[in-house]
Image (tube, rainbow, N blue to C red):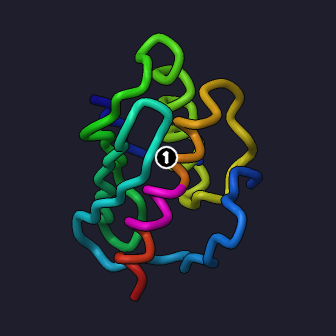
Amino acid sequence: MFVIGLVSGNTVAGAQSLPVQYKDGLYRGEADSFGGKLVLDVQILEGRIESIVVVEQADTEALAGPAIEEFINRVLEAQSPEIDAVSGASHSVEALDIALREALLKAAP
């Protein structure tokens, strides 16, 4: 499980635009990844992305782990899924992007 609090390129074709500020709460997103389902929770506090927790993922930890951590750090820094591309574990990163956008759409005001 990855728990990271406090990320301009990683986008999925046809992805919807997301608001800059969000409704406070805990929001879940899911996507299919290379090894199976990826599930994450996004905590919004005072309209900002406070934390992203990957609660389920079946991709190879040694390969996906560093890319997942980098992706989450970049999202938290940018306060947006619009981040520069993260190299490595492309299926995992794409699944993270999809799941994150799903969660953030639920948090839209």
Res. 46 image quadrant: bottom left
Q: Per the image, is 51 magenta?
A: no
Instruction: Indicate the secondary structure of the residue bearing disc 1.
Output: helix
Q: Which residue is mark 1?
A: 96
Q: Amino acid at mark 1?
A: Leu
For the point 42% across and 30% down, the residue is 35
Q: Quadrant of the C terminus?
A: bottom left
Q: Quadrant of the N terminus?
A: top left
x then y, percent, for residue 77: 56, 47
x then y, percent, for residue 86: 68, 35
* Left or right: 40 in relation to 10: left
What secondary structure predominates along the stretch shown in magenta?
helix
Q: Which residue reaches farthest bottom?
A: 109
Which of 77/11 is in front?
A: 11
Whether residue 80 is situated above or below residue 107 in the rendered picture? above
Whether residue 17 is situated above or below residue 13 in the rendered picture? below
* Left or right: 51 in relation to 81: left
Q: Please state the extent of the stretch shown in magenta in the rendering.
A: 98-103
* Left or right: 93 in relation to 40: right
For the point 48% across and 29% down, the residue is 69
x then y, percent, for residue 27: 28, 65
